[in-house]
Structure formats: C-alpha cells, structure tokens
Image (cartoon, rainbow, N blue to C red):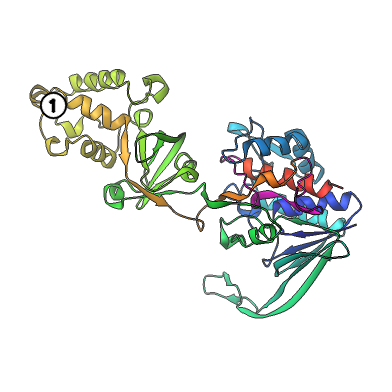
Amino acid sequence: MHTLIIGGGAAGMAAAIAAARAGQTVTVLERGRRPLKKLGVTGNGRGNLLNAGAPDYPGGADFAAQVLAAMPYERLAAFWEDLGVPLRLEEEGRVYPASFLASSAVDALLLAARRLNVEIIVNARAAELVRLPGGGFEARGTVCRYLPDVSKKNGKARPGALAEETPARWRGDRVIVAAGGAAAPAHGTDGGAYGLLTAFGHALTPPRPALCALLADPEPLRALAGQRVRAALRLLDARGACLAESRGEALFAPDGVSGIAAMQLARWWKPGSALRMDLREAVLGLSAAEGGGPEALTETERLLRLRAQRRDGCPLSELLTGAASPALNDALLRAAGLERHSREPLRQLLSARPGALAQLARAIADFPVSVTGTRGFDAAQVTAGGAATGGFDPRTLQSRLCPGLYAAGEVLDVDGACGGFNLMFAVASGLVAGGAK
C-alpha cells in the first residue's frame, strides 16, 4: 500500500508517521522549501502542542469531538512522548515541549519520518488530483527550483527567486489531503488545497480568518496603542445581538485590538459588527462576573463614588489616577461624554451633573470600539471554514464520496480556540487518517 500525502505540515507528517508505522510506503508532497514551517512558530515559537482541558472548537465541534474520541488526549500525549518530546503542562491546560521550543517538535517529527523511510519531496505543488481508472490516485503539478538564497547585511538571508517549474506526477493507492487552510500564506497555506477536494464533489464552507486581530477606526485608539488590559469582550451584530464573547488579555494597536481575547472573536466578525469591552477588571479590579455584566453597574458606581469622596477637591481627570493610565483615562472620559469636563473639580461637577459617575461607570463597563474588519488571512493563525466535515467519516477521515481519499487538519471545516486546540486536532486527524486501512 502506497500512501500519498499532500501537505507536510503537522497533520501531514503525523499521517505519514502513522501510515509508515502501519507498514505502508509513504510519500509526502510539501509545497514549501521545508516541511513543518508553521509548526515551528506555533505558540510564539514555544510550541503549544496540546490542551489538557475540555475541547474548545467553535467550528466543527461535533466532528472534532468524534475525531478526538478516536485519538484522545492521552494517546496524543503518548505520541509526542514516544517521539522523544517530553511535555510540560502549563496554565489553562496548555501543553508544551519541556524545552519550550517548537523546533523540538519539528525535529522529532522529521527524525521519526526519516527513520521510517518516509519520502518527503519539497517544493512540490499539487495542482490537480485525479482518480485513476485502474485504482489509486495521481497528483499532477510541478516541482519548483529556486536560485540560492541571497545574504543580507543584517546577517539574514533572502530566499532565492523561482528559477523554473518542472511538470511532475505522483501516484498513490490512497491519498491524504493535509495541505492546510487559507491562513498564514507566508507559512505555505493559501487555500489552494480546497480545490483538490471540491473536484470530487466535496462542499466548501467559505473560509474566513480566525484567531487574528480586529481592525477598528484608528482615530479613537491611536493614543491607546501598546496598552494591555484584562477585559471581557462582546462582539455585537448591527442590531446589538451578541455574536460571541471572550475574556482575557486585549492589546490596543494603532489600527485595532489584538491579544487573545480579541483574536478569539475574529471568526464571528461580519459587516456592521461592534465591539464592547468591559474594563472593570483592568480599571477597578472588579471582574464582569462580580459586577453582574455591563447592565448591572451599581457596584462600579459605588467604587467610583468612594474614589470621588476621597478626591473631591481634584479635577475629574484625576479621579482614575492610579487605576488607569492617562491615555485610557482620557479614552474613558471621551466615551462617557465627559472629556470637556475633565478639568472641573469633582465636587462642583457632581453637584451640577449628578449622573456623571453613572456615565463614567457605563464607559468602563461597556467601552465601545468601532470594529471595521479583521487583519485577514495574512495575519490569521487559523482558518474558519473549509471542506465540509459531513463529507468525511470522523472514524477514519475517509471521504464518503470517494473511497481512498482522505482529509486531515485545517483543510477541514474545524477550528479551535487559542491554546493548542488547533494543533491538537491537526495531529489527531493526521494520525487517524494515516493509520486507517
């Protein structure tokens, strides 16, 4: 049995190892200059391989659960340990190589593949996949040759230009498409693999960026650039209905909001969406859960009133000194409609405007950000959407439409939350597909 695998990422290499261990001969086609490029930068280079917590898959949850039932956390952890990668459990269930280097996982996978005689062909681009009349499959495409890398003054090298493309064909008794989604094209995934599956009748859920920053009107945020806050975030549709919620760290950027809490919301963005940030934890040490949500502001107002009593001779602009940075303080006053009153003494202001603290409390608990989009596939870590999972058997990852055709990893319509879930599914699905008979 010869297994042909299209894609040399985490899913493809896991599939290659599983297939080779099952006694199959294996060829991997990697379109880039080296396999596992995306794995090498996962977890900010630390290699968040798994998550020991409850599965968290906003996209394709049922399908992911069935795949992970066949390849649960314990078996995945054992897979990495057997490759020689000791693991370390960190906060929020995140599991890393003990070295905290993603390159350790890359090296271990490549060593295992080499020892199992897996053939890896780099710079191999499969543009078409056909089923042969006598059985098996043929991938048709090109093999690229590049000029030598060019050294730069900073010591780094610029990749050499494409020199030529040579037509090529590769055959296999079965084929596993594991060429990734549309996110992070710099790491070799540009959505081109979808056509290999739709050619066999598989439906495609329109791909969209997931786990990337939200773009926003830059003018109100420019002064906040670089500020990190703990916040509870809600993404609302044009009618004010909540599309999704998240909690954690948010990072203001000159053009929007980044950080894990904001990135988790990107997959739900749609035109007309708005972002609301509950900043009570960052400003007053009061979590949204303690305050009862943005509609219950009594406790927030009480804390603001206590601060005002202690600083009644100070101007409004100094009410939050020590609790919020000057830039965030100014932004909150603007959001509350109190900016032009910032120099007024608190005693005088509150006497003339008894509702001022309620306005400020509302701004802290429901800080508005005008979201205009996401940073797109170039900046996204993961793709939401992809080949519809209904066309594949989660027990084997084999196509329900074409026997002998399999899919694994991000090419499928499955996307997980930040924290190792996406790589966990990639490896799990690769192992299931590779080990299927």
x and y, in percent, of residue 220 in the image? 27, 47
The N terminus lies in quadrant: bottom right
- Quadrant of res 353: top left
Crowd tier of the residue under label 1, counting other residues whose Cα lies within 10 Å: few below 14, some 14–19, many 20 or above: many
Q: Nearer the viewer, residue 339 or 321?
A: 339
For this view, does 144 lie left or right of residue 299? right
Q: Secondary structure at mark 1?
A: helix
Tell me which amino acid carries mark 1.
Answer: Leu
x and y, in percent, of residue 386 in the image? 61, 51
For this view, does 42 lie left or right of residue 300? right
Q: Main secondary structure of the magenta part?
A: loop
In the rendered image, residue 410 lying in the magenta stretch gets the answer yes
In the rendered image, residue 26 lying in the magenta stretch gets the answer no
x and y, in percent, of residue 409 in the image? 68, 49
Q: Nearer the viewer, residue 113 or 436?
A: 436
Report the label total. Answer: 1
- Quadrant of res 421: top right
Residue that sits furthest to the bottom in the current view: 163
Q: Looking at the image, which residue is at 74% across and 54% down?
A: 12
For this view, does 253 lie left or right of residue 67? left
Mark 1 lies on residue? 346
Q: Which residues are magenta?
A: 395-419
Q: Looking at the image, which residue is at 80% across and 55% down?
A: 111
Q: Nearer the viewer, residue 320 or 222?
A: 222
